[in-house]
Image (cartoon, rainbow, N blue to C red):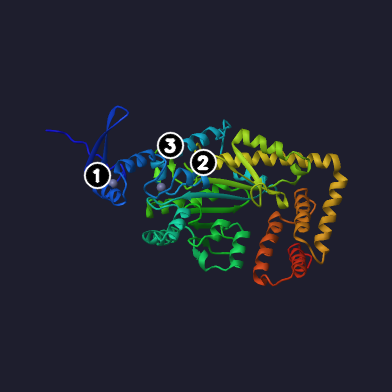
C-alpha cells in the first residue's frame, strides 16, 4: 500500500493539491502542486501556473493568508493584521520579538510586595496608578486591519464578530463593575474631548468609527474598557495614589470573565497576541503617575530616569504624551517589558521603582530646602496667594502655580490635600464640557480662576 502524504496547493496553501507538474530547474526536477481552483484561475488570467506558484512560494513567511497583511505593511505601521500573522509571518515576528527580548530590561532587584503603610508614605509623590491589559479575539483581524477591510467592503462577515465582541465585553463586567457603553460614531467632538482629557480614551480610539468604550458609572470611574482601539480590547483600571496591586486585582477579575466568554488569542509559546509586537506576552502595562518638581528643579530628572531604566527596566515620560514637556511636573513611569514579567510580578516591579523614585524626589526636596529655603518658600507662598486672589488665569500659568502649591503641601505649608489640587483638573474638564466651545479665551480664564478659588476654599 502506498502511503501518500497530503500536499497543499502551492498557490493558496489552503486547499488540497489535485494537480502536479514537474519541471527541471537548475538541473534538478521540481514538482509544483495546485488545487483545481487556483490552477483554473491562473490559466483564466493568462498566466503560467508555475510562475504563480513560484511567486507564492517566495512570499511564504512574508505574508499572512488569513488577513492579507504583508511584511511591507508591517514595516510601514509596525502593526500586524491579525493574531494568525505571528504564525504565518513567523520570520518577521520572530525577528521583532528577538529584538525586543534583547532590549528587555531585566531586574535582579528583590521584589517584595509593598505594605499599605509603605504605599501611604509616598502619597505626596504619587498621583495615581493605572494597569492596562491588551487582549484580542482569535480569528478576527486587528482593528486597523478591520478598518482597511471595511474600505474594501470585505468587513461584512466581521461585523457579526465585532457586535459579539461589544456584547460580551459588556456582559463580562457583570458582578465586577456597573458600566455603560459609548460608541465613538455616536459621540460628538466635545464629549470625546472630555474623555480624552481624563485619559479614559485615546486619540486613535476617538478617531475610529469602529471604536467604543465601556466606562464604570460614577464621578471617578476606575474601570474603562476601550474596544477596537489598537487591539480588540484594552481594559484599564485607575486608582488614586500608589495602588497598582488594587488596580490589577480588579482588572484580573474582568480579564478572567472575558476569557470565559470570548476566544482570546493566546499562543502557548508567545503568550497573548497583540497588534503591536511590543505588547506580546502579558499584554500588560502598569504605570504610576508621579509628581516630581524637586528632581526637575535640581536638574536630576534625567539621571533618575536613567537609573530606573537600568535597574528596573522602567521607562518614564511626560504626562501629556511622548517626548512632551511635562505639565504640572507630572511624569508617568511604566514597565517597558511585556515578555519577561507579568501579573503580580509587574505590579511589584513598578511599585518598587515608584518607591525608589519617591525616595530620590524626597532627597531632591531636602536639597532644595538646604540650598535655597527662603527663595523656595517665598515662591510657593506667592504662588498660593496668586491662586487665591487672581481674577483670571492662563492655563500654563495655572499649572505652574499649582505645581508650587502642591510642593508646599508636601512641605506642610498648607492644610490642603494633594487630591484636592488634582481635583481642580477634573473640575475644569467638567466645567468646560458644560460651557462648551463658545466660551471666549477671556471668559475661560476668568472661569478657570474661579474654579481654582472654589477648590482652594477662598470663596
Ligand atoms: Zn489553491
Ligand atoms: Zn494575519
Label 3 environment density (alpha carbons within 10 Å; few <14, some 14–19, many ≥20): some
| Quarter holding residue 312 | top right
Q: Earlier in the sequence, mark 3 or mark 1?
A: 1
Q: Position of residue 62 (x, y in %)?
A: 42, 41
| Disc 1: residue Cβ within 8 A of ligand 1's nearest atom | no
Q: Position of residue 279 (x, y in %)?
A: 50, 44
Q: Earlier in the sequence, mark 2 or mark 1?
A: 1
Mark 3 and mark 1 in contact? Answer it, CB < 8 Å: no
The residue closer to the viewer here, 226 or 422, is 226
Q: Secondary structure at mark 2?
A: loop
Residue 63 can be seen, yes or no: yes
Q: Residue at x 38, y 54 (%)?
A: 262
Q: Which residue is mark 2?
A: 338
Q: Secondary structure at mark 3?
A: helix
| Disc 2: residue Cβ within 8 A of ligand 2's nearest atom | no
Looking at the image, is 249 positioned above or below residue 106?
Answer: below
- Position of 94 with respect to 120 (left or right) is left
Q: Which residue is mark 3?
A: 91
Q: Which residue is mark 1?
A: 16
Q: Residue at x 67, y 45 (%)?
A: 122
Amino acid at each position: 500500500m502506498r502511503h501518500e502524504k497530503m500536499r497543499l496547493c502551492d498557490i493558496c496553501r489552503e486547499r488540497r493539491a489535485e494537480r502536479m507538474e514537474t519541471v527541471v530547474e537548475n538541473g534538478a526536477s521540481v514538482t509544483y502542486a495546485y488545487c483545481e481552483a487556483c490552477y483554473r484561475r491562473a490559466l483564466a488570467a493568462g498566466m503560467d501556473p508555475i510562475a504563480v506558484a513560484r511567486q507564492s512560494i517566495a512570499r511564504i513567511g512574508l505574508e499572512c493568508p488569513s488577513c492579507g497583511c504583508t511584511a511591507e505593511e508591517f514595516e510601514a505601521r509596525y502593526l500586524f493584521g491579525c493574531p494568525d500573522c505571528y504564525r504565518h509571518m513567523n520570520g518577521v515576528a520572530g525577528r521583532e520579538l528577538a529584538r525586543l527580548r534583547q532590549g528587555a530590561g531585566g531586574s535582579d532587584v528583590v521584589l517584595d510586595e509593598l505594605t499599605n503603610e509603605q504605599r501611604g508614605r509616598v502619597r505626596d509623590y504619587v498621583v495615581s496608578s493605572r494597569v492596562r491589559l491588551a487582549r484580542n479575539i482569535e480569528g478576527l483581524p486587528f482593528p486597523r486591519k478591520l478598518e482597511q477591510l471595511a474600505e474594501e467592503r470585505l468587513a461584512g462577515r466581521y461585523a457579526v464578530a465585532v457586535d459579539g465582541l461589544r456584547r460580551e465585553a459588556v456582559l463580562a463586567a457583570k458582578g465586577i463593575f456597573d458600566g455603560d457603553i459609548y460608541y465613538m460614531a455616536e459621540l460628538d467632538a466635545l464629549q470625546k474631548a472630555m474623555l480624552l482629557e481624563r485619559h479614559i480614551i485615546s486619540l486613535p480610539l476617538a478617531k475610529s468609527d469602529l471604536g467604543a468604550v465601556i466606562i464604570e458609572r460614577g464621578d471617578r470611574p476606575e474601570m474603562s474598557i476601550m474596544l477596537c482601539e489598537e487591539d480588540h480590547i484594552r481594559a484599564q483600571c485607575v486608582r488614586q495614589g500608589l495602588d497598582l496591586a488594587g488596580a490589577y486585582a480588579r482588572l484580573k477579575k474582568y480579564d478572567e470573565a472575558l476569557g470565559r466568554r470570548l476566544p482570546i488569542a493566546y499562543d502557548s509559546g508567545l503568550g497573548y497576541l497583540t497588534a503591536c509586537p511590543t505588547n506580546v506576552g502579558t499584554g500588560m502595562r502598569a504605570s504610576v503617575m508621579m509628581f516630581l518638581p524637586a528632581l526637575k528643579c535640581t536638574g536630576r530628572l534625567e539621571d533618575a530616569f536613567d537609573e530606573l531604566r537600568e535597574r528596573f527596566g522602567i521607562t518614564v515620560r511626560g504626562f501629556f504624551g511622548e517626548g512632551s514637556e511635562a505639565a504640572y511636573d507630572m511624569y508617568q513611569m511604566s514597565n517597558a517589558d511585556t515578555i519577561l514579567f507579568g501579573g503580580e510580578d509587574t505590579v511589584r516591579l513598578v511599585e518598587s521603582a515608584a518607591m525608589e523614585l519617591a525616595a530620590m524626589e524626597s532627597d531632591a526636596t531636602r536639597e532644595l530646602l538646604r540650598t535655597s529655603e527662603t527663595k523656595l518658600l517665598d515662591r510657593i507662598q506667592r504662588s498660593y496667594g496668586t491662586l487665591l486672589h487672581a481674577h483670571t488665569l492662563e492655563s500654563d500659568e495655572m499649572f505652574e502655580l499649582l505645581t508650587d502649591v502642591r510642593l508646599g503641601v508636601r512641605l506642610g505649608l498648607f492644610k490642603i490635600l494633594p487630591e484636592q489640587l488634582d481635583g481642580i483638573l477634573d473640575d475644569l474638564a467638567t466645567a468646560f464640557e458644560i460651557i462648551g466651545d463658545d466660551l471666549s479665551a477671556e471668559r475661560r480664564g476668568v472661569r478657570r480662576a474661579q474654579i481654582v478659588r472654589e477648590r482652594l476654599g477662598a470663596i
